[in-house]
Amino acid sequence: MADFNTEIYAWYASNKRDLPWRETNDPYKIWLSEIILQQTRVVQGLEYYMRFVENFPTISDLAAASEDEILKLWQGLGYYSRARNLHTAAKYVDEELNGVFPSKYETIIRLKGVGEYTAAAIASLAFHLPHAVVDGNVFRVLARYFGISEPFDTANGKKMFRDLANELISANDPATHNQAMMEFGALQCVPVNPGCAICPLQISCYAYINKVVDRLPVKSKKVKIRNRYFNYFVIFTGDSVFLKKRSGNDIWKNLFEFPLTETQNEESVKKLVEEDAFSLLCNFNGTEVETITEWKIHLLSHQKIIYRFIVLRVEREKKITSDLIKVDKKDIFNFAVPRLLENFINNSKLF
Ligand code: SF4
């Protein structure tokens, strides 16, 4: 095991990327970077991290912001519950802990949106506590090097990997240890075509020696993908357009979107506009439809969103329901919207 750590540290010293959150001990910034980097590649996350630190240099600044401001800054990063949780946790630290970030694993993990992985990352990187991080990168490196075929997404498997990672962690410098493990998985021992030919661990790596690199790590569950059909109505009246804030326990909660009708399959526009929700909004006689875009696909981790935009121009809207807001079309850029709407707004030349 000593060799494993020595090789990983030496590899890290010569291969690590210079990233701003590696230059700080500030738990707020480390937390911010960890939340942003969940489900996000470093290149993309970096831009958002810089943006957040610039707009909210301290946790109190983040706590004082409105949720709409935060969601707007988060726009395009996906998994928006991360942004809402970030805000809730910032308010909690600001109001209940006098703005002082918690400094123990047990208190860090109580923050909204912080799980075992993030708590271990903050505890080790900001406070030098020996808690091993176990993320997808670490599962992969450990499974391959030590030849662990137990699926990593079962309770047993998780425990096995966590115990091994905690056994390996260096008490002297847990921060560098964790960074090195994650960076090695992110750059060297990558999921497809890892750099085995130039790997310093090659001579003692179980997977390499036994030619099972592409079979490790093992996952037990297959993700079930659900198809959803989203019909967005882009309804113009004069220079205004209608938006609605998403609510309920669903994707993109609290982001804005055009009025939407979700269907089980590709319904005709005629059928859709006969629905009550739509007829409440405008008198429709068919001539108002300006464009109907092709169906496109937006992939999320567990859902396939099949969507299109139906652009309408109405002379006179009917009674506006309270959950709809009418905005001047040039102001649409101030609203936080899901990525697929952002692309439409930017490319359609309608705004
Ligand atoms: S030899 Fe290949 S599989 Fe083994 S640790 Fe190195 S990169 Fe990963």
Image (cartoon, helix red, strand yellow):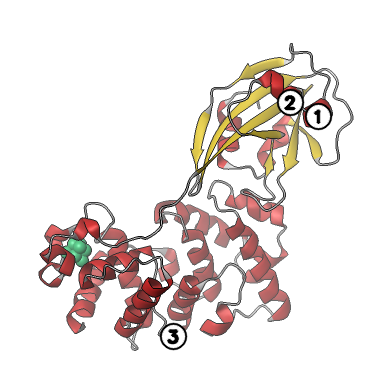
In this rendering, the answer to whether 118 lies above or below 289 is below
Q: List the residue tagged with mark 2.
A: 235
Residue bearing the label numbered 1: 276
**Which comes before the other along the chain, label 2 or label 3?**
3
In the rendered image, the vertical position of residue 337 relative to residue 62, given as above or below: above
Q: Residue at x 34, y 64 (%)?
A: 137
Which residue is situated farthest in the top direction here?
287
Q: Residue 111, image x and y in percent?
A: 61, 74
* Image coordinates for residue 290, horizontal then vertical, percent: 67, 15
Using residue 150 as the reference point, say whether residue 74 is left or right of it: right
Q: CA distance from mark 2 to mark 3?
A: 55 Å
Reading the image, the residue beneath label 3 is 129
Mark closest to the chain's N terminus, 3 or 1: 3
The crowd level at tag 3 (other Cα within 10 Å; few <14, some 14-19, many 20+) is many
N-terminal of the pair, mark 1 or mark 2, is 2
Secondary structure beneath dot 1 equals helix
**Residue at point 58%, 30% (across, down):** 265
Q: Is residue 189 above or below residue 334?
A: below
